[in-house]
Image (cartoon, coloured by chain):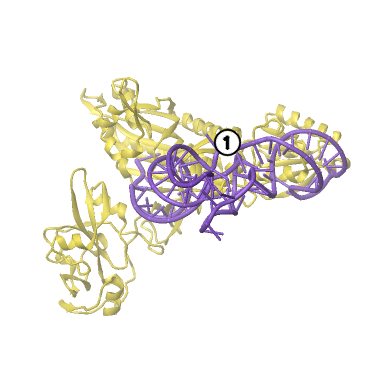
Amino acid sequence: MRFSKAFIPTAKEAPNDATLASHIFLTRAGFITQVSAGLYNFLPLGKRVLRKIENIVNEEMSSVGAQEVDLSFVTPTELWEESGRIEKFGKELLRFKDRKNNSFVLGPTHEEMMVNLVKNRITSYKQLPLNLYQIKTKFRDEARPRFGLMRGREFVMKDAYSFHSSEDDLDREFDLMEATYKKILTRLGLDYRVVEADSGAIGGSGSKELMVIADSGEDTIAVCSKCEYGANIEAAKRSARLEFPDAPQADFMKFKTPNVNSLEDLAIFFKVDPYYLLKTVVKRAVFEDSSEIVFFFLRGSDDLQEAKALNTVGALELVDVEASEIEAIGYKAGFLGPLDVEDVNCVFDIDVKDAQNIICGANEDEKHFVGVDLSVLKDAHFADISEVKEGDGCPCCDGELSYTKGIEVGHIFKLGTTYSSALKAEYLDENGKAQPFIMGTYGMGISRLVAAVIEQHNDEKGCKWTKETSPYMVNIMVSNIKDEDQLSFGELLYDKLQSSGVEAIIDDRKERFGFKMKDAELIGFPYTIVVGKELVNGNVQIFDRSTLEKTEVSKDNVYEKIMGLIK
RNA sequence: CGGGGUGUAGCUCAGUAUGGUUAGAGUACCUGGUUUGGGACCAGGGGGCCGAAGGUUCGAGUCCUUUCACCCCGACCA
């Protein structure tokens, strides 16, 4: 490509609404432009990067036997009604009607469509397993799109769906997909972590997320200092405590606690570590057509993890409650405790099972119990509902957990029969009996990966594309195109690289040295060959974008040198 | 969906408290010239429904009403 002919509108200043590095640089360097909230155009450079990522994904998917398909973007509403997801997805589904007044939605994901495709076409266990995928534009009408390509409304996703006749085979495919995703991210040159995840609204028995490590990531993940363990904060577990603060010694009794309005006050009042206080978090659990107040009890030193709590009670969402709502059901906010609570759904954190020396509310104004033995709660509902903290023990080894931020670029699920049952997609097993397909689903955010690469690879000057993602591998920058020797050498090198299959661009614009260097740095080609004033001495320079180093090379060796570098 | 903010040239922004020449700057763009190793300089030039609609007024970018869009914080997010 010739820079002089290329549509690469670079800009000195970023639009003021860009905050993330990827958004700023992709816009400034002419990769994308914003159309509307969460909608972007891909310009030639952006499209090239997108295609590179797509190609890698295609290669790796097909190498493990997955087959590419392309399903209609517009999907009939009926399928969504059948699966029951029309309600769950809610306003994120962009719905509309055609001229005949039929209802459709723009596909935000394609479980329903894919199940529908396979239904009655795959009819025997002999035809299984099967893994079908597509790379396609999706649309989710996000309440608040943001961060450029990171959270757009329209985005490109690779979504794969596998069909099996046994759980074991699903497990095998799930592991294969995890391995494939790792290969893809490694090829892209990304630092990532595979973490355990909450399955969220899609449901299913197991799921893992692939997180690209970046400070700008929207997800908090807990990772182990010693082993491979990593988990989204929404799903992270910890080992049991090994060291305990000094326990308050007291016989069971009711204690008057005037002017104690918070957990901190209580800890100070009794001079005890919050570990021995019982914290009560009250939420309203909202179900499809009802709702109820739930008391969540956990150690004062812990915080409620809402995603875990939500899953435990099987609700659609948890909402905060006012003190008046608590009083309306006969309890006293600030002095809640688990003893003698009969008419309210109570959930206890697993860490308080059989806990001793506990201080908790007495469900009376200004009264707390001390010396409580929670082993009296024999049949209570115990579950893991607390959020892991930095410094907690790893559940897999003796390492310590710490937080880091990640960009979710992939999510793989074991779906089981959730969708196949709902949509009555069945095959005949060895015994001639109809069974719903056992399914897995595997998503990867292609356009999000474009942004993720830059989030992880940038500096104050601009983008630093990895070799597998760069729109062009080599930029031949002719410092002064009026110098015929420079121009002709640049052209010669350009032709030679092109004919060797190297993706090269020649900066033949009538601009000054500094201007073209700034553009090269902003766009972020891995290598720029500067054909400039040293040419009279028989030399050119190779500029390495990642290290910002310029290396003087004889013009006679530059071809071999660059061919060696780009391998 | 709640709270806050911003809409003026392709981009970044002045101008709006107190209405009053032909609506500005920087940058980008075009022409000519000088320059040629880190976003050059000189001269000339094109480019605006001041987000939209309605209203007040002799007169509105500026005041009033309505509305739309975008951004930020939160809720939400396979």
Residue underneath mark 1: A46
Q: Which chain is yellow?
A: A
Q: Colour of chain B?
A: purple
Q: Quadrant of the C terminus of chain A?
A: top right
Q: Nearer the viewer, residue A241 or A391?
A: A391
Q: Nearer the viewer, residue A496 or A423?
A: A423
- Please name the residue shown 75% across and 35% down the image: A509
Residue A251: x, y in percent?
Answer: 17, 79
- In the picture shown, does residue A393 fall above or below A52? below
Picture quadrant where residue A465 is located? top right
Image-based side of B68 in relation to A325, left or right: right
Residue A400: x, y in percent?
Answer: 42, 62
Picture quadrant where residue A412 is located? top left
Q: Quadrant of the N terminus of chain A?
A: top right
Image-based side of A170 in relation to A450, left or right: left
- In the picture shown, does residue A158 fall above or below A227? above
**Residue A509 visible in image:** yes
